[in-house]
Image (spheres, helix red, strand yellow):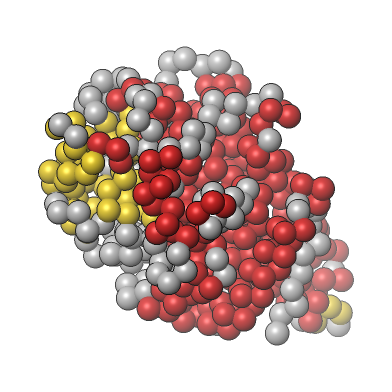
Amino acid sequence: MMKFEDKFSLPLEWISDETKRIVESCREIVEKEIMPIRHELDEDWKDHKIYDKLLKIIMLDFGLQCAPWPKEYGGLESDLITACLCNEEMSRGDSGLSTAAGCINWTFMPMLAPTPNPILIEKFAPLACQTDKLFVGCAAITDARSGSDVENIDGTHGKYIATTAELDGDEWVINGHKLWPTNSGGLADIFAVFCTTNPGVEDDEAFAIIYVPADTPGVKQGEPYQKAGMSGDKNSDIWFDNVRVPKENRANPKPGDDAIAARMFMNAGNIGSSAHSIGIMRNCYELVKEWCGTREVGGKLLKEHSMTASILADIAMMIEVSRSDTYMKARMMTVPDVYGIDPTGVEFLAKTRANKLFVTDQMTILINKAMDLMGSHGYAREGHIEKHWRDSKMISLWMGGRGLAKLDIARWFYDCKSF
């Protein structure tokens, strides 16, 4: 069995003893339940039978489903650093599973932060904090017509959002077509639907996030898509045809606050994506270290050749720097006052976009370098590097894509106004 390795820097003064125990328990689950069956998981993209069992272990038995919720409801009130460390551990084994698990809790963030919504917390926390049944969230963001327009809050202010919500008495009537959200395809129990209350108008007050139970009349889901990888991340189409939900199901009752919550939501997603990436990078390090430490070329171990050592140094360097910056951003979001940062503002959005874009770029480069060292074994299905190679590309493309990330970075750092 491959030796577990973690030689990369972490800000230990920011990590509580409770978090350490949680992460160690998560690691044990990954080593016991995921690592031995990684080759089987790629074929489970449609039925999700193995993934559903693993989600129950992670979310219910381990208790991750309770993580973001208030303690008065049985939650853990875990911080972003704890969530990122768990993302890392799960992504070492399978980043698709880590994505599905992380997105369950991420879905509820707009009702929890920055301004908690007591009505919705009272409504949904008991379902999330019980331990008998999965309560799966799905953030339904991408419109079929255009993906990044929805997430381009500061560029379009909701003007091009195609999914609409119209208030009719005490109910929202939702119409639209969403595509690709994690945990769709029949898995989710509830959707956080990103929509507009005033189509075609640039107006943050019209930007709405409305929670829709999956069994609401008028909701229809398609079959899951088969992708190159990331099988645990179940994606499909969702149609909303005159779907009615109570007025109180809007994440934030005050118009404009959903757009603010969405920025914070994006920031957490950017940082979480980096944590997924670091988990993949760390496992690639483990795999390539074992390969180069046991394979002989020219009469000596592969790692002892200077050409190899140069590549190995690059791999270690990329993980070291990526991990340091990711947990810096997680810390900034956890205690924003210390850093003078608004976790819902354009400055922090630019900085988390920069982090996510940099780390995912490093992940792509690292995997290619590892495959170069391992040759045919690197791309063989019998190994694991090729699984990370297929899975990892999707992380760099979600959250609005690479282009939007660069626009958000330029907007703040260079005070750009025209896009």
Question: Which residue is at the front of the view, 355 or 309?
Answer: 355
Q: Is residue 170 visible?
A: yes
User: With 196 as the anchor, is 310 left or right in this view?
Assistant: right
When the figure is inspected, residue 150 is found, relative to residue 22, above or below; the finding is: above
Question: Which residue is at the front of the view, 248 or 223?
Answer: 248
Q: Position of residue 59 (x, y in %)?
A: 50, 66
Location of the C terminus by quadrant is top left
Q: Position of residue 179 (x, y in %)?
A: 28, 50
Q: Quadrant of residue 282?
A: bottom right
Q: Is residue 329 visible?
A: no
The structure residue drawn at horizontal position 54% and vertical position 62%, both measured from the top left corner, is: 64
When the figure is inspected, residue 2 is found, relative to residue 408, above or below; the finding is: below
Q: Quadrant of residue 90?
A: bottom right
The structure residue drawn at horizontal position 70% and vertical position 84%, both measured from the top left corner, is: 1
When the figure is inspected, residue 242 is found, relative to residue 95, above or below; the finding is: above
Q: Position of residue 239 (x, y in %)?
A: 19, 50
User: With 275 as the anchor, is 303 left or right in this view?
Assistant: right
Question: Which residue is at the front of the view, 372 or 14?
Answer: 14
The structure residue drawn at horizontal position 59% and vertical position 45%, both measured from the top left corner, is: 271
